[in-house]
Image (cartoon, rainbow, N blue to C red):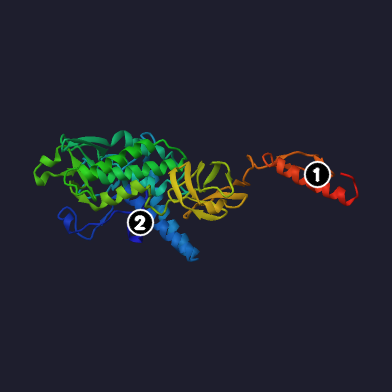
Amino acid sequence: MANLTDTGPGFGGYFAGYFGLVDAPTHRAGDRNEGKSTENNADIFAALTALAAVENQLGNTAAAAQWTTAANVAGDFVMQMFDAGQGRFNLGTVPTHANPSPTPGPTFCPGPTKGNDILNTCDVLDANTFTTLALAGASRYRNQIDWRQPITYVLNRFQTSVMAAGQPFNGFDLVLPQTPGSNGVAWEFTAQAVVAMRYVDQLYAQTTFEAAAAMYVAEMRHAQTSAPFGDGLGLVASTLAAGETLPPLDQCLVTPFQCIAERVGLAASIWAIFADQNINPFPASQNPVPALSALAPTSATAGGPAVTLTVTGSNFVPSSVVQWNGSSRTTMVVSGTQLTAAIPATDIAQAGTASVTVVNPAPGGGTSNALSFPVNHPGSSGGGCTLSPGTTVDGLDLTLVCLLGLMVVWLSLEHFRRRRKHKEGAVI
């Protein structure tokens, strides 16, 4: 890590690594590549934060602090790459002393210089999605920017549609189309955008992006079954306009970084699973503490059937779990503000009051406030009994009178009164 840490007067962060044989003759193998990537530094932040969490769990607080400090070097670099005017993240930086000097083009869009760095303002999708997934939930960066901005930017700039095999396909490209005919859907990056949309919705306890996210999940399912060169199992990495008619060597989506093949891809398939299951794979993201506001239904009758309980609140995450009197129940996450939980009949077999909470797991997370769920006696109404202060029968104070059971209670008391008067020698 020390060899790749930028300690110069520029933006800081971590260098890209070392040049290899494939970079010759432009660069000598083994020389340090002092370019810096926004996406890669976001990945580094997530990885080092995860290491810090492991050390904390092991009780190694000093080691955890060191990893956290190292993680923040990457995270702080990433946040400096945010362009507040456009609401997006820049691609990264290149060194001022690069030899040969980089030529402006699709991978280098020269911006302002700071110290040893030239800001690279090129526009790519994953500079926004990866950074959001890795940093938006971290306490250090959660409130530095409005994390809805980079997701809105992705939605407005990188959406694309193509016709292939006589069918329309809608998704996102990694970059803006560079040349006519280079337009296509990159499914790995479409899935990343969906994960980021849903994650930001959860952070802000909203559903702003859910309609778009659900639509693109449906598009991925469509591509899984109908895109050219698919196998009905995994997801193709890309779909090009009329891609099935192209020569084999042209059956890939050209970007400045890679040619994304129109074949089933591992990364596309895995990210599609993440998108479908609403999973942010970056463990460094800190889960918020959930909060509850309402339950539906609001009560149940003892001895009744199982109940599907709808829990409304905020800060729910994909791993949120509803607890009933402190025990976990099968939970489905509907959105960042709503959960449903399966409450079995055994939980409401006896009258009483249950405590309902929601737990978000670590990292971060915690237990919500508790809401009460009354389980009423059969035959009772609402809360079960109504208060009637001062009501007496033969000196017995009836402060709780069950409305529907009133006749039974009265007859029992009348029987008790008659027996007592009989014992006292009264004439009935």
Q: Nearer the viewer, mark 1 or mark 2?
A: 1
Image height of 331 relative to 177, above or below? below
Camera-nearest residue between 77 and 51: 51
Residue denoted by label 1: 397
Q: Quadrant of the C terminus?
A: top right
Q: Amino acid at mark 1?
A: Asp
Quadrant in the picture for residue 151: top left
Q: Would you say 349 lies left or right of 27 here?
A: right
Q: From this viewpoint, is residue 72 visible?
A: yes
The spot of residue 255 in percent (x, y) is 20, 43
Q: Would you say 75 lies left or right of 394 here?
A: left
Q: Would you say 357 lies left or right of 275 here?
A: right
Q: Residue at x 30, y 45 (%)?
A: 191
Residue 140, label in figure = none
The spot of residue 93 in percent (x, y) is 30, 46
How many residues crowd around disc 1 within 10 Å: few (fewer than 14), some, or many (20 or more)? few
The spot of residue 337 in percent (x, y) is 48, 41
Q: Amino acid at mark 2?
A: Thr
* Circle 2 SS class: loop
How many residues crowd around disc 2 within 10 Å: few (fewer than 14), some, or many (20 or more)? some
Camera-nearest residue between 411 and 243: 411
Quadrant in the picture for residue 4: bottom left
Residue 5, label in figure = 2
Q: Residue at x 36, y 50 (%)?
A: 42
- Furthest residue to the left? 247
The spot of residue 271 in percent (x, y) is 30, 49
* Circle 1 SS class: strand
Q: From this viewpoint, is residue 107 visible?
A: no
- Furthest residue to the right? 425
Q: Sequence order check: which comes first, mark 1 or mark 2?
A: 2
C-alpha span from label 1 to label 2 = 79 Å
Q: Are marks 1 and 2 in contact (CB under 8 Å)?
A: no
